[in-house]
Image (tube, helix red, strand yellow):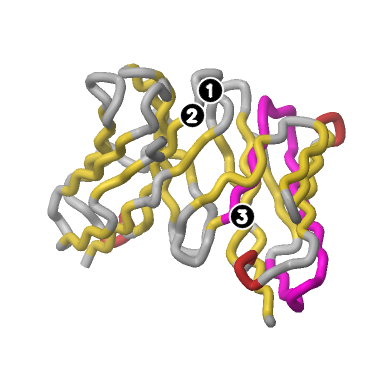
């Protein structure tokens, strides 16, 4: 089956710093989503981005489907950005596969 | 509008007990998914419904796990004879009619003692 990798696994940032999170996947996908899981466990939709580039405030994402990767950019990080960031891909059979996540800690 | 809701939010069961977890999807969402998330890991797919039809149950870990969505709206995940390894957060998601973007509920944290 499809494999999803995320890097880095852990990241510690000083408040105000920028970062890039990466998601690699091993096969063609129908769609890709980025989620933020907050410390209370809620999965929050960040981007639905099967291809191209999207921006929402301090966050932006780019997916290059032909090269099988997606990037999530966080600029001017805040302590509330802490948590785990997951990418999830959907195959043609509707099964959704999550990556292992990147655990982000933003320190003041 | 209201998001995906799940109940109960927390459940403690003694080993061997049966449990039932409920998911109310977003109104109008035809697709519904169940996931299991163990501590420190990403969610893992359990099963998928389109309306009342269970189209994929390949992720259910054993025959003790059973899911239903009889009227194509509310879904129930039932775990029979719970074991300690069933302890996890169970997440439900529903997706838009074009079956692409998923929205998650808050999850049910199951602890089996």
**Could you say whether the residue bearing mark 2 is in a helix, strand or loop?**
strand
What residue is shown with label 1?
B99
B94 above or below A15? above
Q: CA distance from mark 2 to mark 1?
A: 5 Å
Label 3 is found on which chain of the structure? A
Q: Is the residue under label 1 in contact with that under label 2 (CB below 8 Å)?
A: yes
Which of the pair B112/B61 is nearer the observer? Answer: B112
Residue range highlighted in magenta: A10-36
Is A25 magenta? The answer is yes
Q: Quadrant of residue B80?
A: top left
What residue is shown with label 2?
B95
Which of the pair B56/A12 is nearer the observer? Answer: A12
Identify the mark at residue A96; answer none if there is no mark: none
Is B6 magenta? The answer is no
Overall secondary structure of the magenta section: strand
Q: Is the residue under label 3 in contact with that under label 2 (CB below 8 Å)?
A: no
Please give left or right for residue A7 compared with residue B41 in the image. right
Looking at this view, name the residue that lies furthest to the bottom. A108
**Could you say whether the residue bearing mark 1 is in a helix, strand or loop?**
loop
Residue at x 24%, y 62% (from the top left corner): B112
Please give left or right for residue B40 compared with residue A29 in the image. left
Q: Are marks 2 and 1 on the same chain?
A: yes
A37 above or below A103? above
Could you classify mark 1 by the number of other residues whose Cα lies within 10 Å: few (under 14), some (14-19), or many (20 or more)?
some
**How many marks can you see?**
3
Identify the mark at residue A100; answer none if there is no mark: 3
Label 2 is found on which chain of the structure? B
Q: CA distance from mark 2 to mark 3?
A: 22 Å
Could you classify mark 2 by the number of other residues whose Cα lies within 10 Å: few (under 14), some (14-19), or many (20 or more)?
many
Label 1 is found on which chain of the structure? B
């Amino acid at each position: 089956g499809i494999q999803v990798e995320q890097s880095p696994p852990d990241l510690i940032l000083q408040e105000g710093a920028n970062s890039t999170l990466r998601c690699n996947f091993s096969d063609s996908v129908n769609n890709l989503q980025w989620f933020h899981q907050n410390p209370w466990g809620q999965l929050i939709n960040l981007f639905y981005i099967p291809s191209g580039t999207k921006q929402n405030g301090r966050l932006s994402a780019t997916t290059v489907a032909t090269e099988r990767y997606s990037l999530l950019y966080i600029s001017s990080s805040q302590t509330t950005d802490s948590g785990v960031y997951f990418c999830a891909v959907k195959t043609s059979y509707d099964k959704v596969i999550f990556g292992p996540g990147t655990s982000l800690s933003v320190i003041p | 509008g209201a998001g995906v809701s799940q109940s109960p939010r927390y459940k403690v069961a003694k080993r061997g007990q049966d449990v039932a977890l409920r998911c109310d999807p977003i109104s109008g969402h035809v697709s519904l998914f169940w996931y299991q998330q163990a501590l420190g890991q990403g969610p893992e797919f359990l099963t998928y419904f389109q309306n009342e039809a269970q189209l994929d149950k390949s992720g259910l870990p054993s025959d003790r796990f059973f899911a239903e969505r009889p009227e194509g709206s509310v879904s129930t995940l039932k775990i029979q004879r719970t074991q300690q390894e069933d302890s996890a957060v169970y997440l439900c998601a529903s997706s838009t009619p074009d079956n692409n973007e998923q929205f998650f509920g808050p999850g049910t944290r199951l602890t089996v003692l």
